[in-house]
Amino acid sequence: MHSNGSRVDRRLTILLLGMAGATALLLALIMLFLLSEAWSFFANRWMDGSWLQLFYSQNWYPLEGQFGMAPMILSSLAVTVGAVALALPLGLGSAIFLQFYASPRSAQSFRLLLNVLAGIPSVVFGLWGLTRLVPLITSWQPPGASMLAAIVVLTLMILPTIALTSASSLASVPRELLAGSTALGLRRNTQILYIILPAARAGISSGVLLATARALGETLAVLMVAGNVVQNPSGLFEPVRVLTANIALEMAYAMGDHRASLFASGLLLTVLVWLLSWFAHHVSRANKQERQHG
Amino acid sequence: MIKSLTNVLVLLSTVLSLSVVQADNRQLTLTGSSTVAPLALEIAKRYESLHPDVRIDVQMGGSSRGINDVRMGLTDIGMVSRALKPTEQDLTPFLIAMDGIGIILHESNAMSTLSNVQIIDIYTGKINNWQQLGADDRQITVVNKAEGRSTLELFLQHFSLKNSQIKAQVVIGENQQGIKTVAGNPGAIGYVSIGAAEYEQALGTPIKLLPMAGEVATVESVAKGYYPLSRQLNLVVKTKPVGLLKKFIAFAQSTEVRDLIDAQFFVAPLNMESKMDSKVE
């Protein structure tokens, strides 16, 4: 009986190892593909010494040989930071409401609402933004298609992610902590602020990381409302172009160096997301160690 | 054993020689303009579905590559998104569609016409308020196309502009996005394929198409070749087409592909049938 069980275990281990390996291999192949497609572009820039221009030139005119990516990198970051800054308080607030203040019935319908919001395809958000939100902003501050429109649309898209992951990590805080703090006579808001939230911090920050990666990678909805002019993000009402929108706008018709440059920007985006997740991982580990020692 | 082997060899060589002889009648290669390619691909797919033994290969690479490849004999048909130049008279063009773009404004805009100079001044940022042209005091939102799009190429070429000279407030990809952007912004100006704009206008979308150099921007005007902001989409061959080549070109110019042309927002040229007769024969 025992040996039979361990054999099943061993088979399962091999199977799971294979699946994990396949996932890793797939990722490696994608990276390899990106690298090989972008390689000629980097090589050409390196040869003529203009590779630094990628990061400080303001001009993106690929058909005229000008490949400044800095404005798009900054725009991607600005739009993402803006959306997360809006969605984090809203999402966290929703999660706390859901977990501690809502009556069972309203919690149920609110949760349903968040699930529906999470399931809306991005093209629907984009269409809504293009036909409702942008004209609204236009009547106030033309041209309307702007960083603000992109931030609002992205906020709506990542809000359910943050709210639902936060709610589930709040729910998984050990009941003893809650019971203990109630026994100490702490008020509800003190409990939430000083006991529950710190205990759920890891779960919440991984939810925020997920949301950030989604905001960075979102393409269609942003493309439809952001105006897509390549310039540094200088104001909320100014149009900007993010890296993903750039790839989607130009890939269908790009050839030669232009095409390779789009793969290069895709590579850049991937590296950006990696840096972000490495950073988040680092921060959460530092937090954990601090808690263990203090 | 040896006999059967010989049999197989004989059979094999027969099949091979047959396929070599018939290669010209089963396979076609098209290279050239990335504007024509999507349409040519659709036409090729339909032709293949009607003639299952035929393979048609469509490759992009720009109009000049199309010209080059045909001259060098590297391809059967070149795709060229313009009329042939005087230096290219050694080749024969077959017009399959017209591509026309229209300048669009919001319906409420008081302007009913713009000169080429005014359009250039608006797109380069010298004029940034409709008041400067005698209309309402409203900031102009310039809508431009993303780099690499054929509509952008035609627009720049027509007004002798470089994309880096254009000061746009909104950059779009698809025609639909441009139409929705202009429809939602009373101060916007944009340009899209005429077929797409006319279609949306008929549905009640609040946009209007401006005439160019006195010619109304309609599909009909493009089809007749009167409208200036337009160009020909040609299939180009080196020698007088025979066999499959002839059949395919005739198919591409027939009414059987009219819906494919409309779907790409191109315009079917008028008097197609007579042109085909005079050129193919």
Image (cartoon, grey):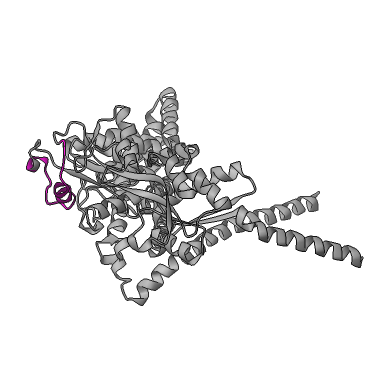
Quarter that holds the C terminus of chain A: bottom left
Residues A212 and A8: in front is A212
Q: How many marks?
A: 0
In percent of width and height, residue A128 lies at 33, 34
In percent of width and height, residue B177 lies at 32, 40
In percent of width and height, residue B80 lies at 40, 55
Q: Classify A7 as above or below B218.
A: below
Whether B127 is among the magenta residues is yes
In percent of width and height, residue A257 lies at 39, 65
Query: In the image, what residue occupies the spot 29% across and 53% down?
Result: A75
Residues A252 and A199: in front is A252
Residues A35 and A23: in front is A35
Query: In the image, what residue occupies the spot 37% across and 32% down?
Result: A97
Q: Quadrant of residue B161?
A: bottom left
Q: Classify B202 as above or below A68.
A: above
Whether B150 is among the magenta residues is no
**Residue A209 visible, this angle:** no
Q: Quadrant of residue A19?
A: bottom right
**Residue A217 visible, this angle:** yes
Which residue is farthest top?
A105
Magenta extent: B112-132
Residues A67 and A255: in front is A255
Query: In the image, what residue occupies the spot 7% across and 38% down?
Result: B134
Q: Classify A101 as above or below B280.
A: above
